[in-house]
Image: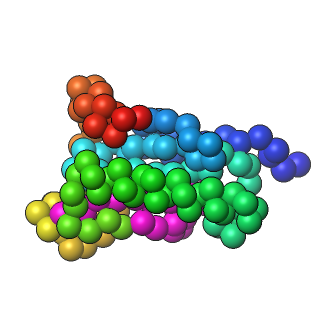
Amino acid sequence: MTNHTFELAPELKRDCIELADWPLCKVLLLNDSQYPWFVLVPRKPNLKEIIDLSDADQIVYLKESAKLSKLIMQVFSPDKLNVAALGNMVPQLHIHHIARFTTDAAWPAPVWGKFPAKPYTDEQIIALKKALQL
């Protein structure tokens, strides 16, 4: 039997902090303070690829991704913004938005598994939400 209700993948529940619910997507913060690393997850069941979204939801997703991308650029002024839907480890559709800096610990390599995560403090999370107005 297929699941007809949205549930956040256990790995995302474990590794992320929920920041907001937008019309389509849940906005998550990966709990690693070394990088401003956000994840958009469409709140629809059984999605693996962006093309699994309806045409209308693809447009909403693109607008929400652009909104998050602009917020990241305004708040963090990164050298590069990486946006990617990989899903090799977590099959549920989720799209990474990672602010990268030439001074970050992993630059220019990918951030995945490069260094152990450094969790955010409660104060950092509050400040981040305020800065992003989430």
Q: Which residue is pictured at 88% across the width and 48% down the height?
A: 1
- Is 82 positioned to the left or the right of 8 in the image? left
Question: Is residue 79 shown to the viewer in this render?
Answer: yes
Q: Which residue is pictured at 16% across the width and 60% down the height?
A: 104
Q: Which residue is pictured at 74% across the width and 54% down the height?
A: 46
State the image quarter where residue 106 is shown.
bottom left
Residue 90 place in picture, x, y as percent: 55, 57
In the image, farthest residue toward the left: 103
Is residue 12 depicted above or below 79 in this figure? Answer: above
Foreground residue among 53 and 11? 53
Residue 8 place in picture, x, y as percent: 61, 42
State the image quarter where residue 134 is shown.
top left
Q: Which residue is pictured at 32% across the width and 65% down the height?
A: 81
Residue 78 place in picture, x, y as percent: 22, 61
Foreground residue among 115 and 121? 121
Foreground residue among 79 and 38? 79
Residue 73 in magenta stretch: no
Question: Is residue 90 shown to the viewer in this render?
Answer: no
Residue 70 place in picture, x, y as percent: 37, 56
- Is 121 positioned to the left or the right of 37 in the image? left
Report the magenta residues as a range. 83-101
Is residue 112 depicted above or below 2 in this figure? Answer: below
